[in-house]
Image (cartoon, helix red, strand yellow):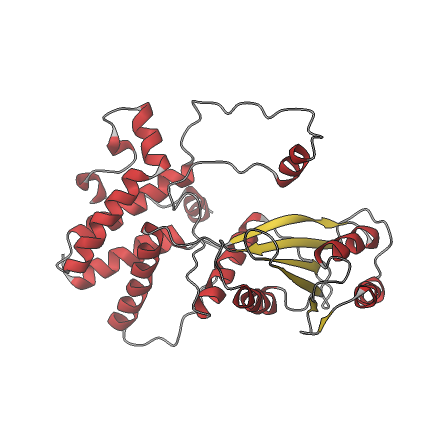
Amino acid sequence: MNGPQVDGVLVQWGERLFYSANRIVRSPPTPRLDTLMRRKAAVIRQRIEATVRHAPQVVVMNAGGGRGMKAIAAHFRYISMNGRLVIEDDRGVERTGEEAVRDLLDQWRFGGARIEEVGHRREAFNVMLSMPIGTNAELLKKAVREFAQVELKGHRYVMVLHEHQAHPHVHLCFKCAAATGGRLYPHKALRHRWRETFAEKLRGLGIEAEATRQAVRGEQRSSEPLWRIKTRKQGLLRVQTAPAKTASPVPRGATDAMISWAHILEALAASGDPGDRELAKRVSGFIRDSTVFKESVRRRPGREASVIPQPAKLAQPVEPPRSMDRKRER
C-alpha cells in the first residue's frame, strides 16, 4: 500500500474514531488536495501515537449547579474559600476577599435576567476541569481561561484555581442565561466537545493532553455518580450499589471503535514506511491490552475476529449508519 492510500485510510477511519459526528472542524484554507490529505493524516497519526502511549486525559466534570442565588452564593464561597483564593470573572478581573465575592454575587443577581434567592430551574452550572498530578497549575488556569473565552462566550462566569489537593484543577461556574437571551445546558455531546477544546488549549501551551472517549481507548467501565461518592465518604449512603451484571454486552460504540482501529491497523501494517509499520505493532499491542478486547475474548475464547475483523472482512465496504439510510428514504 503506497503513501496516499495509507493516508486516505487513516483519515477516513481516524476521523470516525477521534471526532464525533456533531463536532465542528475548522480547517485552514484549502491547498492542493494531496497536501491537505497528508496534513490530515499527520494529525491522525499524532492522535494515534498519543492514544497508544496513554497520554494524559483531560477531565471536564459536571459538578452540579444552582437553582437560585442561595445555592450559587454557597458555591462561590466554597470554591474561593470565602474569598481567600483568587476568583477571576469573565472580564479577566482577579480579586480576593469576602467583599469581592459579595460584589460578584450582586452582579449575577441583578445583571440581565434577575435570579431569585430560591428558584425552580438551574440558573448556573458548576464545572471542574483538571489534569493529572505534576501539571503546571498556572498553565492549567491559562488553558481554562482560553477555553472559557471560546465555549462560554456571552455568559457570565467565574473561575478559581485549586492547588491544595492531589492534582491541580479549576472550578468554573457559569450563568446559564447568555447576554443574547439564550440558555446553555452542558449535555453529554457538548461536554465531550468541551474536553476536546480544553485538550487543544493545553497542547497549545506545551502540555501533552488528550480527550479521547472511553470507547476509543478500549475501556469499558461506568463512572460512579459524584453525589454517591461524596455521600459514601460522609457515611450517609443508605442503599448500596447493586453489583454489575457479568453478562452485559459490549457497547455498540466500543465495537465501532474496534472496527475503526482494525482498519487503521491493517493500513499501517501494509505501509511502505517503516515508521508506520512500527506504529502498527504498538497499535496491535494497544488493542490486545484493552479492556474491551480482553472481555470479548474471555466470553468467547478463540473468537478474536468478533472484536477485530480479519483482513478479508476489512476489504468489504462499510454500510452507512441507519440514520443516514432513513434520511435517504425521506
Q: Residue furthest right?
A: 117
Observer-nearest of 168 and 198: 168
| Left or right of residue 314, residue 191 in this image | right
Which residue is rendered at x = 43% and y = 54% of the image? 56
Say above or below: 242 vs 144: above
The relative height of residue 168 versus residue 217 in the rendered view (above or below) is: below
Q: Residue at x 78, y 54 (%)?
A: 72
Looking at the picture, tell me which residue is in the foreground, 321 or 229.
229
Where does residue 27 sit, x and y in percent of width and height? 41, 70
- Across and down, in percent, residue 138 comes to 55, 67
**Image quadrant in which you'd find residue 309:** top left
Residue 235 visible here: yes
Which x, y percent locates residue 167?
A: 54, 53
143 versus 15 height, above or below = below
Figure check: 258 above or below 212: above
Q: Nearer the viewer, residue 169 or 303?
A: 169
State the residue at coordinates (87%, 53%).
117
- Which quadrant: the N terminus? bottom left
Residue 82 in the image: x percent, y percent?
78, 58
Q: Nearer the viewer, residue 232 or 110?
A: 232
Image mark count: 0
**Res. 318 visible in picture:** no
